[in-house]
Amino acid sequence: MALSDVVTLGQYIPGNSLLHRLDPRTKFLAAITLTILLFFVTKLTGYIFFLVLFLAVVTASGIPLRFLLRGLRPILFLILFTFIVQALFSQEGNVILQWGFLVIRDAGLWKAFFMSFRLTLLVLVTTLLTLVTSPIDLTDGLDRLFSFLHVLRIPVHEIAMMMTIALRFIPTLLDETDTIVKAQISRGAPLDRGNIFRRLRGFVAVLIPLFVSAFRRADELAQAMESRCYRGGEGRTRMRAMVLHWTDLWTALVALALGLVTLAFNWLAVP
Amino acid sequence: MRIEAEHLTYIYGPGLPWEKRALDDVSLRIEEGEFVGLVGETGSGKSTLVQLLNGILRPTSGRVLLDGVDLTDRRKPIWKARLQVGLVFQFPESQLFAETVAEDIAFGPRNLGLSQQEVSKRVEESLLKVGLEPALFRQRSPFTLSGGEKRLVAIAGILAMWPRVLIVDEVTAGLDPRGKRDILTRIKLLHRNERATVIMISHDMDEIVSLVERVVVLKSGRICRQGQTTEVFSDEESLAGCGIRLPTIPQILSSLVKAGWRLPVSIFDVREAARLIAQEYHHGTV
Amino acid sequence: MTYEDVTPKIVLQGVSYCYPDSTASPVYALSSLTLEVKAGDFLCILGPNGSGKSTLGRLFNALLIPTEGSVQVDGMDTRNTALLWTIRTRVGMIFQNPDNQIVGTIVEEDIAFGLENLGIPPNEIRARVDWAMEKVGISTYAKHPPNLLSGGQKQRVAIAGVLAMKPSYIVLDEPTSLLDPQGREEVLRTIQELHSEGITLILITHRMEEAMLACRLLVLEKGKLAFLGIPAQLVEEDELRRHAHLDLPLAIRLAQLLREKGIPLPPFLPRPEELVRTLCALKRST
């Protein structure tokens, strides 16, 4: 299996849904709102409402849920770990299970559930944002959204350019890693067998060529950019003007309203 | 070593939006000591096929047999078995990583668990096989070599594992004429002197006909044509159907034949072609 | 004097280039080269790896500044940093690896990159991007991410990116060496079209077949000019070609042999099709 099959974060899926068409700035702010909201929600009803809301957004995006969920695979371990730690070490609530020194309490179980739920949705929201926004739109949006930081001597344009280039080279470098891994396994590299130390030794044989190649690429790219008159953000124009549409305003208002409703659900209801 | 591929099918990203059937029911048999060319358009499945033959990819269905041993059998530890098929990837110099040429070539043999003495012996021997003088190259950093030399070192790294089959994927791509010629000469010698079974992937038909005895043509993951080189490269139309063009000399001969000249098409040697064309020119009737 | 008064051409006057190195004895990548590339020329630079081809290419657009001597583009000295961006707008550069020169994550965004750097107004950028995509035939992929394109398509994206800046000269550093035959053909066809529309080309290559398409050839050997003349002349220079490892394309070699056998072919037929056509015409007239 190729590496790019596993990593969904940062992979844009072209489409023409409402979500695809929104201004990246709106999407970015909406995603931030959702994320912040997630930290305010503490009750079951709030979570349920949030989940329903999120599923509605996913449906509107036209991205298959199955595909979105694949994005969780790399961090499944982290989610599981959070759950277990929360479940085992919480000191609140009544004991429901005891086995040796391991104690599981009901409140702890709830908390563990909420925590992993929060983490899961956090990743899903971010993944969804990158799936419906082309990397260039996203970095462009961030560039413009934060350009006021320029006055504070923060190199916003340069950071955005670095992000664009990083995103541009992710698929290239994933493919390259894939090839180098295969090539070294073909030389008997213990990447897929033996104990951890043997495997680590094998990884050196992958990392060094990967770094060598990345530096060579960086060097060539720098030459190509210079040849095309790149000299930083000063005096640069953009082909695409970013215009906020009415839909953006509506989306922002709806997002705000829904945020308030979620909070209301959370506070009004009893867990 | 005999390689048999039985009904090999390979699907990339099954169930994903970009699912792709890279190889579709390919059966193939390559005998000990053969020199086989594997050709086809980009994306026809050549690289996938050779990666299945050396076991680095597992087929979605079908089997690969090395001298009758099933490489796809999940119940057996096969990593040593598959190392008998040495695969030189495209741009193999990109896998060089050690501080010296000798260390890099030693990587494979060490992974096989060989003694230090045996490893050094194989390093020397492999350098000689690719035509690099051990005394001059052993201690150099692979990153200071020329493009052609780097590639030879990478090939030596595979040869040091004593593979019984050598597969080379676009081994001359991006090299200058001299680097190209050095590498092709070495591969020809390996085949002739060591009786190595060699499978060569190439886009350059002139290169293919100057070396191989038998050709397998892939198109869209299926075998489109296969047979003796002279036989496969004698029919322009059916080759075009496989997305392959004739090599330079047969192309010229074929055009002349279409214009009414009486000439054979599958002649690869330029002198022989000149002799036949001159003969037909001076004595033939059109 | 204004720059417009000068006849458009690139002039290299006694150019040497020495890579900054810590070692005591400097190694010259190029030594005392004098050359003139007039507007409308199609100059091909040949030579083995390490002969200084790429160094020379990078001197044309001020990526490198000569250690000795001067390079003037339409009268502008590349040492004058105030003229740097004007020079680079006038002399476009295409590199070997298409992957490492595409900046944008979408085709049209990449083509706009150079124009954005020049501070051109958005609507004009849009118009020029569309024009450049049309010109090299990639309009259908405007919204594609570049990593999904074939090598030939990627290289044409790179060419469109340079073309959009409306350069007078384009320097191409081995633009086809990493491509398959189809990609190579796409790129060659594209650049020949550009030449026929008045863009001056400087093509660096290993391949004699490509060199034969040029108006003039320059052969470099160890940083020194070994040959400068028309392709037909190089065909005659057996000694030089052997030295520089420049094998004649098979079709030209065949024509040479046929002449030896008494067929009155003209001395230089760069393409196989021309050889066939001429042979048929001669045969009919006998």
Image: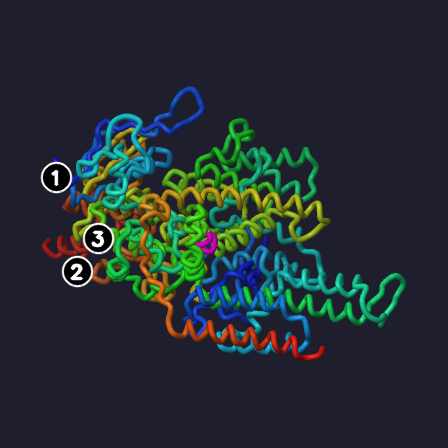
Which residue is under mark 1? C7
Which residue is under mark 3? C194
Chief secondary structure of the magenta portion:
helix
Task: Between label 3 and label 2, give the one nearer the viewer.
Answer: 3
Q: Which disc, if any, is residue B286? A: 2
**In the image, which residues are magenta?**
A163-168
> Was residue A167 drawn as part of the magenta stretch in this picture?
yes
**Viewer-proximal residue among B229 and A189:** A189
Judged from the image, the secondary structure of the residue bearing numbered disc 2 is: loop
Asked whether residue B267 appears in the rendered view, the answer is no
Q: Residues within 10 Å of mark 2 (few under 14, many from 20)?
A: few
**Left or right side of C21 for A122:** right
Task: Between label 1 and label 2, give the one nearer the viewer.
Answer: 1
* Residue B45 screen position, x and y as percent: 47, 62
**Left or right side of A231 for A125:** right
Amino acid type, label 2:
Val
